[in-house]
Amino acid sequence: MSIVPKETIEVIAQSVGITNLSADAALALAPDVEYRMREIMQEAIKCMRHSRRTILTREDVDGALSLRNVEPVYGFASGGPLQFKRALGHRDLFYVDDRDVDIRDIIEAPLPKAPLDSAVVCHWLAIEGVQPAIPENAPVGVIAAPSNGKDYEQKGGHSVDIKLPVKHVLSRELQLYFDKITELTVSKSDSVLFKEALVSLATDSGLHPLVPYFTCFVADEVSRGLNDYSLLFALMRVVWSLLQNSHINMEPYLHQLMPSVATCLVSRKLGNKAAENHWELRDFTAKLVASMCKKFGHVYNTLQTRLTRTLLNALLDPKRTLTQHYGAIQGLAALGPKVVHLLILPNLEPYLRLLEPEMLLETQKNATKRYEAWRVYGALLHAAGECIHDRLKIFPPFPSLQAQAVWKTNAKVITTAPNKRKASREPMDIEPPLKRTETDVQALASTSPSSPHMQEGTVTPPPSSDSGVGQSSSDGKVIDDGRAGSGVGKQKGDSQALKTSAILKQVWKEDLNSGQLLVQLFELFGEGILSFIPAPETSLFL
């Protein structure tokens, strides 16, 4: 017996226009209709399983009809669920209530929005405990915590439950640790306990949850404590200790730390008293900046570029004070000799031309300004000296002087030409050596290695114990003895001269430009630049 009643067959026959179908024919057609329905449904279930779904849809039935070479069912598909109604006079007969739709209403209806392509978009909910400010994340300030801990929003007539961001919970021990470190930094930075706290910051492995709090603490205290020298120095030491801790990842917080650190380097005024040594703070901060660039430069490719641009703008701005110029020079010098060669040396000569009036007593009566100018001059000298020393290291070793050799005269070096700058009342320990004048350079050129006296030898063996010190330099007998030496010594001298000439030729190559650079620095700084060059190289150039 079929599960399809004969009444259903009669209704279907009447819907297609057959009115005289007999009851026996309807009873005979019912099993065949059931067989065809089961066959279609089995094929539709196969399509559903191949689509890896668990719900049978209209598309599955259409696919089954296509597999059986049966024309699929066409019509207007509504978005809502199908509504069945009971047929009048039949208890077990249902039909779909299809309403008549006017084609004009469908044409005049507004077009729906174009459907979006299916895609998967990823975004960060939080990075190291910090929620990034992106459109996908709801801003914390907009969402206010309700009284019952839940928040509801009416959207399309339905209530939507919004989960609030999770608060960053710190343990009681970490809170006490943070409070104690901040208290020592603000009020007891010169105590022994603060030094032990710095060691703890540099070695402890459980301090990573406190890094965002320390970052905000440093930024806030630097912004409102520029007149407190001891506080600024303590804050920079805290940052240095955090950078030395291998258990802490400081990368996500560099964008908050770098403005505070750069402020302590190129700020106009650090501290409130003139006796406070803000120069030491700028030197320490320069080393801190260089350490940050060295440690995180491979992660942030633009970190050193942005920093050097900031420091160069501070150096070349004539409206900035000399203390700001000093911090910029120290920061650029800490980044390495290549940065000095590319950024400082091309601007060195015009800058010294503007700095020189600030260093002289005749043009600058303010002792503080004059002292600042000499500090800037010393920073430039040290940066240029380290640069030329680094460039000379790439050459092969220069031949050193003999161990028992002395200069031709034992008397002190006497400069006949007057000094370019007049003596001032500044302390001599802060003034670098005076610049050589043009006559000094000509005097050096007259004693160049091309002269016969330098080629034949300008050094003599040490005098005997019973002879006076001044006798070996006053008469020329010792030099005549040196000229009458053995042929072997002469050959050694010729080979050493050839080797020296080859090395000098390499130094004076146009691509390396080290020889010309040394001459330029010698003309700008005088004998002060020679202290950065080892003795063999100095003897060859002079």
Image (cartoon, grey):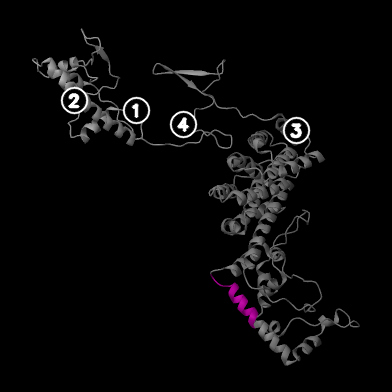
The Cα–Cα distance between marks 3 and 1, rounded to whole angstroms, is: 62 Å
Ranked by sequence position, the earlier of labels 4 and 2 is 2
Residue 182 on image: x %, y %: 72, 34
Identity of the amino acid at label 3? Lys
The Cα–Cα distance between marks 4 and 2, rounded to whole angstroms, is: 57 Å
Task: Find disc 2 in the rendering and name its residue.
Answer: 32
Q: Evaluate whether residue 114 shows in this view.
A: yes
Check disc 1: other Cα within 10 Å, few if <14, some if 14-19, many if 20+: few
Q: Which mark is residue 55?
A: 1
**394 in relation to 109, above or below:** below
* The N terminus lies in quadrant: top left
Helix, strand or loop under label 2 = helix
Task: Find disc 3 in the rendering and name its residue.
Answer: 180
Q: Which mark is residue 242?
A: none
The Cα–Cα distance between marks 4 and 3, rounded to whole angstroms, is: 38 Å
Find out whether residue 501 is within the magenta segment: yes
Identity of the amino acid at label 1? Ile
**51 in relation to 425, above or below:** above
